[in-house]
Image: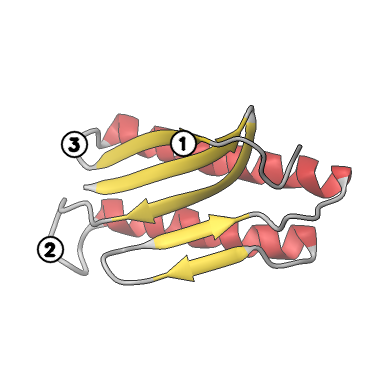
Amino acid sequence: MIKVQFVRTGNTIEGFQISGHAGYAEHGHDIVCAAASFLAITVVNSLEVQLGCEGIVKGGEDGYLSYRLPEELTEKQQETAQVIMRTLETGFQNLKEEYPKYISIQNLRIKGGASK
């Protein structure tokens, strides 16, 4: 199962973590994993291009990807970041609706964070 966790401060999405594999099909033929990977990588790349700066990105084995927004963002950058992050959230919600056995979505609420 792919586990998606959105890190939030209030209504602001500060970042996300993705781990695991869907197990929908064998490696190389798993459309759920491919869709999840495409969504996540597109969002990370889009954030970098649209914000003009890099966030904190960590990757690893077992389908792990973690992203956190940079701490110092202007109001305009934060607005842009939130549109992109909510697009990712919508994409994963749509994927979960279509393949509910293969995607888990959680929210982690934190105090403080990059956006106050």
Looking at the image, tell me whether mark 3 or mark 1 is earlier in sequence order: 3
Q: Is residue 78 left or right of residue 25?
A: right
Disc 2 designates what residue? 26
Q: Is residue 86 left or right of residue 100?
A: right
Disc 1 designates what residue? 108
Disc 3 designates what residue? 101
Residue sitting at x 18%, y 36%: 101
Mark 1: which amino acid?
Leu
Quarter of the rendering containing residue 48:
bottom right
Quarter of the rendering containing residue 49:
bottom right
Name the front one of labels 3 and 2: 3
- In the picture, the disc for residue 7 is none
**Vertical arrangement, residue 30 with respect to residue 90, above or below:** below
Q: Secondary structure at mark 2?
A: loop
For marks 3 and 2, give the CA distance: 16 Å
Find residue 40 and report its horizontal and vertical position in percent: 48, 56
Residues at discs 2 and 1 in contact (Cβ within 8 Å):
no
Q: Secondary structure at mark 1?
A: strand
Find residue 39 and report its horizontal and vertical position in percent: 47, 53
Residues at discs 3 and 1 in contact (Cβ within 8 Å):
no
Find residue 94 and report its horizontal and vertical position in percent: 41, 34
Residue 17 vs residue 49, the one in the foreground: 17
Q: Secondary structure at mark 3?
A: loop
Mark 3: which amino acid?
Lys
Residue 14 vs residue 93, the one in the foreground: 14
Residues at discs 3 and 2 in contact (Cβ within 8 Å):
no
**Vertical arrangement, residue 83 with respect to residue 30, above or below:** above
